[in-house]
Amino acid sequence: MRDSILGLELTRVRGLVVLACVLALATTARPDDLEKRKAFAQQLTRNIARSGMHKIYLPDFTDTSGRQITLGRFFAGTLSKLLDDNPRDLAVISRVDVHRYLAKSGWTDRDLSTADVLAKVASEFSPDAIVWGSVSVNQDVATTDLIVRDPSGKELFRNQYEEKLNPDLREDFEAGQSVADFYFVGLDGVTLPKCLHCPIPPYPVGQGSRSLEGDVVLSVLVTLEGKPDQIRLVQKLGPVFDRAAIEEVRSWRFEPSKDPDGKFVPVRVPIQITFKMHWQVR
């Protein structure tokens, strides 16, 4: 394809794909929401202290029916980190450690609703309280209802938190209902996976694509083996571009994320690929 501009002949020689913000934590909230989260965590910490509790555990939050959901896992990890970062005398039990302990018997956080399982976890980790949460979404607002109970099941207090969801991420959160363990980078002490083989997809010239520039954002599960899995399209650019991004990312390989003990853990991460045209003047 050729165009004449001011007497210069421009030839589009190929597409240039810029890999921008690869594996950036797209779930990061707006600054106002971050401050709101911190304020809520401080309030919750004060309430826990007033109840005489010093060691707590936050299992994955569920939806209102008790089903494990991606959004519940994200908010549980986020709140756990904020509480752990609080300077008050409060110990937050590692969610990774509890999940690993439960997995040995084929259990998940959901099985903590069973008295026998809860008793075993209480004996192993000695929490003073469990922070249970359920998340509901109305339009773009997520409401988290918290109930704090001691290990015997006695209710200590309740709290509620609301946050407006990032529209680009809501579909991804709601699509992921797997009960298999995975984590989010930056939460629960989990590190970023490292690209070992991450080739840039070519611009899809001559494949029915229009001359577009922009971003394709994918949500990808990076497995324990460092392979991309369960790829979901979060932000579209066009069918040809979306397909090119997905097909190339399937070939990527990573060094998996690690937990605080240096053990590999699966993570769900966003990957942003920016397509730009490259022009050459002749």
Image (cartoon, grey):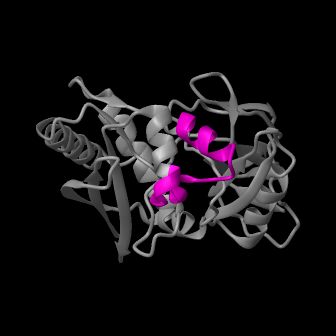
Q: Is residue 160 left or right of residue 198?
A: left
Residue 78's spot in the image, x, y percent?
40, 44
User: Relative to 85, does residue 77 appear above or below in the rendering?
Assistant: below
Q: Is residue 102 left or right of residue 250?
A: left
Q: Is residue 222 visible?
A: yes
Q: Quadrant of the C terminus?
A: top right
Residue located 60% across and 64% down the image: 176
Q: Quadrant of the N terminus?
A: bottom right
What secondary structure characterizes most of the magenta part? helix
Residue 189's spot in the image, x, y percent?
51, 30
The mark tally for this picture is: 0
- The one nearer the camera, 21 or 82, is 82
- The one nearer the camera, 123 or 274, is 123
Q: Residue furthest left?
A: 50
251 part of magenta stretch? no
User: Relative to 257, does residue 140 appear above or below in the rendering?
Assistant: below
> Magenta segment range?
96-117
102 part of magenta stretch? yes
User: Relative to 73, does residue 84 appear above or below in the rendering?
Assistant: above
Q: Is residue 99 left or right of residue 170?
A: right
Residue located 63% across and 39% down the image: 100
Q: Quadrant of residue 43?
A: top left
Q: Is residue 275 visible?
A: no
Residue located 63% across and 66% down the image: 236
User: Relative to 20, does residue 59 appear above or below in the rendering?
Assistant: below
Q: Is residue 47 left or right of residue 94?
A: left
Residue 29's spot in the image, x, y percent?
37, 48
Residue located 28% across and 58% down the image: 146
Q: Quadrant of residue 235?
A: bottom right
Residue 104's spot in the image, x, y percent?
69, 43
